[in-house]
Amino acid sequence: MIFHRTRTARNTVASLVVHDLDREVAFPAVGFVASVPGTEAPLVPLELPATLTGQARDRVARRQLRDAYGGSDSGIDARPASLGDAADRWRAMLVVDRQARRDWAHKVASAGPLCQAILPDYLTLPASRDLWVIDVSGQVIRARLGLDDGFTAEPDLALALLQGALTKVPPRAVLRHGPLSPDLDAWLAAQSLAVCLDPAGLSVHGVTPPERFAHGELSLDLGRDPDAERAAMRRTLRGLSLPIAMGLTGCLGWVTAALLEVTELRTQALTYRQNSERILREVVIPTGPILDIRAQVSQVIDRARSASTETETEARPLDVLRRAGEVLQAHETTITRISYQPGAGLVIDLQIADFAALDALVAALRTVGTEPHLAQSVTRDGGGVEAVLAMAVRQKGRNQ
């Protein structure tokens, strides 16, 4: 029998009661989380590339589990441990014996929707970033290491697991619950870890108070049967197959009609282009390929407009030299080179007494209608200044 549990709002999860399913006591009359031994439902760490997401990440993780369990995963139930801030980059799977999971689900069946989830006991501990929560209960130690890791183990194994976690990411503080444990407390003291017995003291170490069931723990509900959910989904999809097929048939008819209309429009567009090319051949472009009608017609019009100014454009360097010649003669300059560069205009390399004389020369050249641009100026070794001027003629109209 499968009960569909109601969703629990985030602001009420902290009020859920934790019920130890191994204890023969009545279920609470309010919403609760059933706790089962964490030794029977461990988090198995995996080596997964950070770039893998979704089903690809799940497939690689299950392949690693099969390798770890001797090539077979029959009899076990595994689900991604999507905990903490990076739930899509989960690094472990919650593994449990399939029959044990069914027995737990059968036990809580009579509680109905009051049972919000079945979780291993270490996931019922509160959690916070950069914080270890360690609880001693009976002959086992339960630990919650940050947001996405935890375990339940006997003291010897627990100390080994804590030592391994410490070498990876040490916590800022440890919140210690439960009675004294000489070995555990001595180990914590030897590591110089900040141990707090009350959450109020965590702020001194920059750690926020831990919260219970606020980091995705309820999504790992062991009362859910993934196989049964997948079977129900398959039955639902089979029931939808006929409506989907009818919808696809209607969609195919619409696509066919749209393709016919597109074909007709393409034929009409081809006719228009052929007529346009015939007119261009007769009037504008008698020879050569016609690739882009708009661009080629614009080029023909531009060439016609600029034809009357070609002579003036070709004579521009001489015009610049004529206007600048008198100014250059009036200043004590030595011309070492004159050249013409498209885009830059007339380029004159010269030598002059100093930078003040160079500034005066540039100002005088502007008065005769040229646009001098000082491209380079350096001090000569023997005294004076070497400069490179690029000059063009100001044009206020076509015939200037």
Image (cartoon, helix red, strand yellow):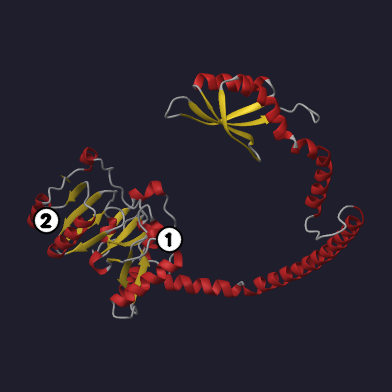
In the foreground, 370 or 194: 370
- Distance from disc 2 to disc 1, alpha carbons, whole Å, reads 38 Å
Q: Is 377 in front, or is 162? A: 377
**Which amino acid, by three-letter code, is at mark 2?**
Leu
Q: Residues within 10 Å of mark 1 (few under 14, many from 20)?
A: some
Residue 337 lies, in percent from the top left, at: 58, 35
In the rendered structure, find residue 5 and report the number of the disc placed on it: 1
User: Picture quarter containing residue 392?
Assistant: top right
Above or below, comparing residue 237 to residue 121 in the picture: below
> Of the residues tagged 2 and 1, which is closer to the observer?
2
Quadrant position of residue 399: top right
- What label does residue 184 carry, if any? 2
Q: Is residue 39 above or below residue 134?
A: below
Q: Residues within 10 Å of mark 2 (few under 14, many from 20)?
A: some
Query: Would you say 346 lies left or right of 277 here?
Result: left
Q: Is residue 155 left or right of residue 235?
A: left
- N-terminal of the pair, mark 2 or mark 1, is 1
SS category of the residue bearing label 1: loop
